[in-house]
Image (tube, rainbow, N blue to C red):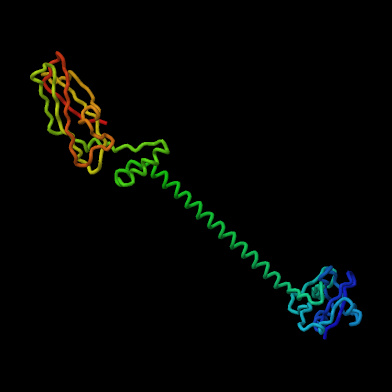
Amino acid sequence: MRVITHCPACQTQFFATEEQLNQHGGKVRCGQCMQVFDAMAQLVSINEGAENIADADSSSKDDTPAIDSAAPVQTVPELEASDSVIEITAPETATETAKQPAYLGDAIKKNRLRASHTTGNKSRKWLWVAASLLMLLLATIQSVYFLREEIAIYYPQAKPLLVQACQKLSCTINLPKKIESIAIDDSDMQEDADHPGLIHFASTLINSGHHVLAYPNLELTLTDVEDKPVLRRNFKPSEYLPAGTNIADGIQAGDESRIKLSITTGDIAVAGYRVFVTY
């Protein structure tokens, strides 16, 4: 059986059952103003309560809020410790849904906090992933920049792309310079019979390495009869290579380039020569 009681502080009326009131000696807490009062002493007649609360029997569905007997027992400072109260809320209308128990509200709050914490962890995780990918990309770009010449050697198909990138970055891609892979072979020097003081020098430049190399400079030293240097000169690739040679392409692995030079010695007597390649 349900009865109607009202809060003496705010005059809000509530539905309650006798079992709920008897369970805690009639002590309840108003859900509207949080005032603790004796519901048994504040009972009102059904006729008086009907002015503010519609009778539940007039509706096909009984959704009037009632006191939840499963709600946790609460104590208030002004009451004795043994005086437990039930918190009840005032319905805004006669058909308002019953108030959720306190423990259910706590569980919902905990679930929301847990969901918020999980969402925050996922956001931080994706942030770390994005930052890691960005750092990896920057490290890759930096490695390609500093190793661009080696990449062009081992991956010739990537060289056009590297050249285009260097045009925007104001950098260059130079061919490797490994003097130990360059050899001079079949050298010869002869005086011109028709032109005194004119010497013809011929030799062969060989790339014994496994990759294309830049053309080296040629250092030619002419010596006298005592093998002392009397003339020395450095020749650039454009000076000793045949006309039309594309110097930028370098000397391919295993290739040979023929060298021919004509040198004027004037009145200096020349008996021998020494030739070196340098970068």
- Residue 97 appears left or right of 252: right
Q: Quadrant of residue 163?
A: top left
- The answer to whether residue 139 is visible is yes
Taking the view exactly as shown, the residue that stands out farthest to the left is 193
Who is closer to the viewer here, 145 or 196? 196
Q: Quadrant of the N terminus?
A: bottom right
For the point 89% across and 82% down, which residue is it? Answer: 46
| Number of numbered discs overlaid on the protein picture | 0
Q: Quadrant of the C terminus?
A: top left
Taking 36 as reference, is 251 above or below it? above
Taking 91 as reference, is 258 above or below it? above
- Residue 78 appears left or right of 266: right
- Residue 241 appears left or right of 104: left
Taking the view exactly as shown, the residue that stands out farthest to the bottom is 1
- Residue 234 appears left or right of 31: left
Task: State the image coordinates of residue 227 (x, y, percent, origin top left).
Answer: 13, 21
Q: Quadrant of residue 77?
A: bottom right
Taking the view exactly as shown, the residue that stands out farthest to the front is 244
Task: State the image coordinates of residue 203 (x, y, percent, origin top left).
Answer: 15, 31
- The answer to whether residue 66 is visible is no
Task: State the image coordinates of residue 158 (x, y, percent, origin top left).
Answer: 33, 46
Taking the view exactly as shown, the residue that stands out farthest to the top is 267
Taking 146 as reference, is 123 above or below it? below
Who is closer to the viewer here, 233 or 238? 238
Q: Quadrant of residue 59?
A: bottom right
Who is closer to the viewer here, 66 or 64? 64
